Image (cartoon, grey):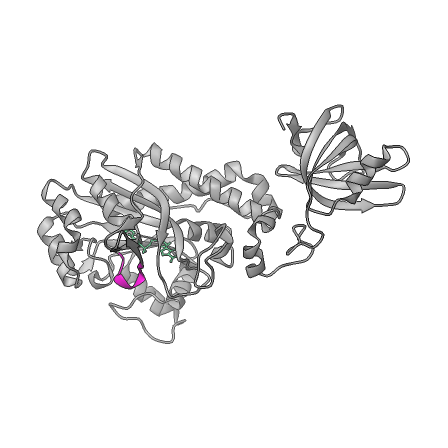
Amino acid sequence: MDNRSFTANVSPGDEATVAGWVHEIRDLGGIAFVILRDRTGKIQVKLEKDEMDGEMVETALGVHRESVISVTGDVEAEDRAPTGVEVVPESVEVLAEADPELPLDPSGKVEAELPTRLDNRTLDLRKEEVKAIFEIRSEVLRAVREYFRSVGCTEINTPKIVATGTEGGTELFPITYFGEEAFMNQSPQLFKQLMVGSGLERVFEIGPIFRAEEHNTPRHLNEATMIDFESAFVDHHEAMDVCEGTLRAAYEGVIESCEAALETLGMAEEFSVPQGEFPRLTYEEALERVNATGELDDVLVWGDDLSTEAEHALGADIGGHYFVTDWPAEVKPFYIQDYDDDPEVSKGFDLMHPRMELVSGGQREHRYEELVAGFEEQGLDPEQFDYYTKMFRYGMPPHAGWAYGVERLVMTMLDLPNIRETVLFPRDRQRLSP
Ligand code: AMO
């Protein structure tokens, strides 16, 4: 189909071949219209029954909606056509017939429930507003990659089949690896840290992570995509600077490149890059502030995690993105460094959107003895992590990093009600196919 033109690119005076899906057929008697849709938009094809080849008219009007056709003809100006132009066909070819009954209506006139949409994602993605989400997701990833390069990172890819977990043992998916027990990776954490001790120093990865979470919530998935960053010779505050930069780059990219998609989602007016430096509250300050809102049933005390309710109360109070820093050491993983002068407090941080957590990160423990002691404190066997800890004896620089969940970034950016809207084929408790 070398000679195919996109519907958005043809103009009056052209002779063109357009190809796509039959969006709608309007038969008005002597005259009929086929609305043809491709990835750039829609175009009207005019069929004058008495003046055109009967067989061609029959072919065009005989197909069911959502069939794939190719139309060759002259493009003419027509004020009454939805896009101001129409094709007057010389030939119409049916490339793929669609069944008369479809499991969902891609024109969106009949709404479908989320499970039906996800079961038939191919058809669902023919809807402009669904496609727009994935165009934006694609741009977010492009902009983030470019930003990482601009701050001197190398993109890496680390194993997804691993021997040990890092983020808590209960959330692992076990698999059999040539007769041995192995797991799907929960996070590139240990591998990215090993890379800061390599000649690469400053790295990022965008890849899948797997978590056997029991939660079936609008913001948890069992397979997600993570944006991971790790850099030698930075502390947690510098890592937060890069984190903030990444978020802004993502929003800026979307503003620059996704005007039409934002328009389709009805967000073109309100969408803006989060401004100003994000407040950095210590965990203690966050507790005080959330308790002061009076929104919680129970007063939070040192050591409590921020519940969803607390996150919402704090988010509403602050009204934008913010960091929570200096978490209690006991709620953060073994690889996070604690303050030497206050070992109850860690250098871990989270980046929060008013609706939910987007990022976790921190300054890492790079000193061998302290790292091994941290394993033991968390009831983990350092022997099992020998491949990791060993490298801390051969020159591991101070380092820090973090990870975003891509889906939560897109979900909060577009104010979507459910994280599944941001994944082509979500994996959750109920869903393993498609
Ligand atoms: P954490 O476990 O907090 O940290 O994950 C980082 C971010 O990933 C996203 N995320 C998820 N999104 C959807 N469904 C899930 N089940 C899910 N789990 C996590 C969230 C979360 O903030 N290794 C550390 C990061 C680091 O310190 O560099 C880690 O994995 O947006």
Within the image, what quadrant is residue 86 found in? top right
* 413 relative position to 201: left or right: right
Could you tell me if residue 117 is visible in this image? yes
The residue depicted at 62 percent of the width and 48 percent of the height is: 127
* 336 relative position to 115: left or right: left
Query: Can you give x and y, in whole percent of width and height, for residue 150 in the image?
Result: 35, 32
The residue depicted at 43 percent of the width and 41 percent of the height is: 141
The residue nearer to you, when weighing 245 against 36, is 36
Up the image or down, 169 lies above or below 73; here it is: below
The residue nearer to you, when weighing 376 against 278, is 376
The residue depicted at 35 percent of the width and 58 percent of the height is: 211
Within the image, what quadrant is residue 60 found in? top right
Within the image, what quadrant is residue 383 found in? bottom left
Query: Can you give x and y, in whole percent of width and height, for residue 255 in the image?
Result: 51, 40
The residue nearer to you, when weighing 417 against 382, is 382
Could you tell me if residue 266 is visible in this image? no
Is residue 168 rendered magenta in the image? yes
Query: Can you give x and y, in whole percent of width and height, for residue 381 in the image?
Result: 15, 59
Is residue 175 rendered magenta in the image? no
Magenta segment, which residues?
167-173
Query: Can you give x and y, in whole percent of width and height, for residue 343 in the image?
Result: 14, 59
Q: Quadrant of ligand 1?
A: bottom left
Work out which quarter of the rendered image holds the N terminus and state it: top right
Up the image or down, 160 lies above or below 334; here it is: above
The residue nearer to you, when weighing 212 against 75, is 212
